[in-house]
Image: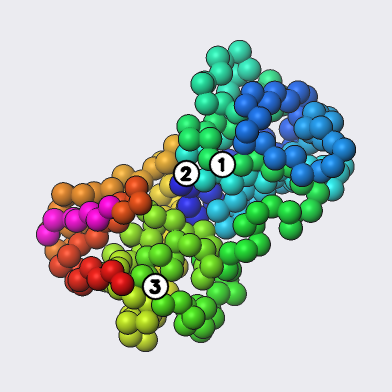
Amino acid sequence: MPEIPELTVIAEILERCVVGRQITAVQVLKPLVLRNLIPGETPEGLLVGRRLAAARRHGKFIRIDLDGANAQIVINFMLLGRLYLCDPAKRHLAKDHLALALDDGQQLRYHDEKTMGKVYLVDDLNLVPGLFDAGPDALDPDLTLECFLDRLRPFRGEIKGVLTRGACVAGIGNAYADEILFRAGIYPFRKRYALSPEEQTRLYHAMRDVLTESIPIVRELMGDDMREKPRRFLAVHGKKGQPCPVCGGTISEVRAARRGTNFCRKCQPGTLVRN
């Protein structure tokens, strides 16, 4: 699942490579991911002739504004959704779902191996499921330490779940939650209520630092290819069995519900308790 660093860079690539371009044709290759929430309009009627006016990240979503219309494209990539640019003559991949032909001769395609993501066409952002249900963005300048601690207070579950579910803060998924908790030295399965004030403060600063530091690295590694998910630079996520970069111990992995949690048992001591 793309998270804040990848989605920030994807929005930058869209701004650089496609914003200002006019949509000349639309191909709905697999309708399942497309959600047209504007009654009486077809995707072709909404999109053909419109220019892509702006692109931005909103939590785990990408929003693309269209000029000359009160309409937007909103993308929720979910697990394996990806955008990519290519020559229209390039053969479609089996899991390409949507293709927008642009007036510079490129196609912007949405690809999704799991068909879990959604591409919404809306004139009211409130209609997009989950867009405004999450908490403030994890990098929102207004999310001060005090605000973060206030938002944490009602939650009682495992701290990794608190970070990833989005109700507390938006934009963090499985990978960067592992990195944040490693940086903070907090065991991922600790209950939120068991964290001391000092640990909660460390968590806030680790969250801001890890996400902020990762964006320029992702920007360099991704280049202009939005399909890239550069995470080899991460300290613990995806590093099961490798040495911890801090203490040299072995990175552990606990799997549940098809999701792996990576952490260092020496740097993040704790005991897994389910109740």
Where residue 141 sits: x, y (%)? 57, 71
> Could you say where residue 14 lies in the image, as x and y percent from the top left?
62, 40
Earlier along the polypeptide chain: callout 2 or callout 3? 2
Q: Main secondary structure of the magenta part?
A: strand
Q: Secondary structure at mark 3?
A: loop
- Marks 2 and 3 sit apart, C-alpha to C-alpha, by 23 Å
Q: Secondary structure at mark 2?
A: loop
- Residue 189: horizontal and vertical position, in percent? 30, 68
Q: Is residue 111 above or below residue 253?
A: above
* Residue type, label 1: Gly
Q: Are marks 1 and 2 in contact (CB under 8 Å)?
A: yes
Mark 1 and mark 2 lie on one chain; the one further toward the N terminus is 2
Q: Which residue carries the number 3 mark? A: 157
Q: Which residue is at 16% across, 49% downward?
A: 241
Residue at the location (36% across, 70% down)? Answer: 158
Q: Residues within 10 Å of mark 1 (few under 14, many from 20)?
A: many
Q: Residues within 10 Å of mark 3 (few under 14, many from 20)?
A: some
Q: Which mark is residue 117?
A: 1
Eye-nearest disc, 1 or 3? 3
Mark sitting on residue 79: 2
- Outermost front residue: 275
Q: Is residue 251 on the magenta stretch?
A: yes
- Identify the image quadrant of residue 272: bottom left
Secondary structure beneath dot 1 equals loop
Instruction: Check the image and report above or below for 210 versus 109.
Output: below
Kind of residue sitting beneath label 3:
Gly
Q: Residue at x 39, y 55 (%)?
A: 174
- Rounded to the nearest whole Å, what is the CA distance between mark 1 and mark 3? 27 Å
Work out which quarter of the rendered image holds the C terminus and state it.
bottom left
Q: Which label is found at residue 29? A: none
Asked whether 191 or 207 is in front, the reply is 191
Q: What range of the chain is rendered magenta?
A: 249-255
